[in-house]
Image (tube, rainbow, N blue to C red):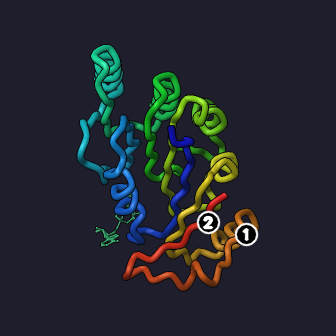
């Protein structure tokens, strides 16, 4: 089995984060849960309430079926979803706009636990964000791969240089029109 990974995708609005996320997901044949904050994904069962999602996961597990869920829920449910993902294991967990569910760069409890121990439950995590400087340090420090589209915000550029050793001139020069990106593995 492939080692579960944590991928962090950064880039300004419209740079291509969700498009690339969909491409990566389309090659993935297993179970997935997508925290789809602004409704960018299709290709799974869409839930706008927690309860039906919980019923669905139980049913899929019972009948040994894959979970393919797209969640458009209030942010107050985020940590509960992380708990469920951790309990079920063996899946791809996508978090769109991670900075929207982490207040002041703090990780909710179950997200923190997923980032630390998700690998042991074979949970692969991919999260997108416009603002690296606003994402939890735990998330970026655990990331096994950074994918960076164009970013121009000075705070985010210094963050990328300081914490990830990224050459920020390269980040500034990535073409937004051509959805160019660069990556760094850890
Ligand atoms: N590699 C690509 N080839 C062609 N079109 C692309 C590519 N990447 C992105 N696009 C298109 O560019 C637009 C913006 O891409 P996308 O929605 O992925 O940006 P984003 O970074 O997720 O933005 P936001 O932060 O606002 O959610 C979309 O219409 C998408 O279809
Ligand atoms: Mg997007």
Q: Residue at x 66, y 47 (%)?
A: 142
Q: Residue at x 36, y 37 (%)?
A: 30
Asked where in the image residue 16 lies, by quadrant, the reply is: bottom left
Question: Label 1, label 2: how many angstroms apart (C-alpha)?
Answer: 9 Å
Residue marked by disc 1: 165
Specify whether tag 1 is near ligand 1 (CB below 8 Å): no
Q: Residue at x 46, y 31 (%)?
A: 90
* Disc 1 crowd, CA 10 A, few/some/many (<14, 14-19, 20+): few
Q: Please provide percent x and percent y for residue 8.
A: 55, 56
Q: Please provide percent x and percent y for residue 135.
A: 61, 53
Vertical relation: 54 (above or below) 171: above
Residue farthest toward the right in the current orientation of the protein: 162
Kindly identify which numbered label has been placed on residue 184. Answer: 2
Along the viewing direction, whichever of 95 and 133 lies nearer the viewer: 95
For mark 2, give the secondary structure: strand
Say left or right for 85 vs 115: left
Asked where in the image residue 145 lies, by quadrant, the reply is: bottom right
Viewer can see residue 72: no
Q: Are marks 1 and 2 in contact (CB under 8 Å)?
A: yes
| Numbered disc in front, either 1 or 2 | 2
Say left or right for 156 vs 124: right
Q: Quadrant of ligand 2?
A: bottom left
Residue farthest toward the top in the current orientation of the protein: 62
Vertical relation: 160 (above or below) 95: below
Along the viewing direction, whichever of 170 and 51 lies nearer the viewer: 170
Q: Please provide percent x and percent y for residue 28.
A: 36, 46
């Amino acid at each position: 089995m492939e080692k579960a990974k944590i991928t962090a995708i950064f880039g300004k609005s419209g740079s291509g984060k969700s498009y690339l996320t969909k491409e990566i997901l389309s090659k993935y044949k297993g179970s997935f849960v997508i925290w789809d904050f602004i409704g960018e994904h299709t290709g799974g069962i869409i839930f706008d309430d927690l309860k039906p999602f919980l019923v669905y996961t139980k049913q899929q597990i019972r009948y040994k079926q894959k979970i393919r869920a797209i969640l458009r829920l209030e942010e107050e449910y985020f940590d509960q979803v992380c708990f469920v993902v951790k309990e079920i294991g063996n899946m791809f967990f996508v978090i769109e706009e991670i900075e929207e569910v982490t207040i002041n760069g703090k990780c909710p409890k179950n997200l923190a636990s997923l980032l630390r121990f998700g690998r042991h439950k074979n949970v692969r995590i991919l999260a997108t964000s416009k603002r690296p400087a606003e994402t939890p340090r735990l998330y970026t420090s655990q990331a096994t791969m950074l994918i960076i589209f164009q970013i121009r915000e000075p705070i985010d550029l210094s963050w990328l240089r300081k914490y990830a050793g990224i050459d920020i001139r390269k980040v500034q020069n990535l073409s937004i029109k051509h959805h160019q990106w660069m990556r760094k593995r850890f």
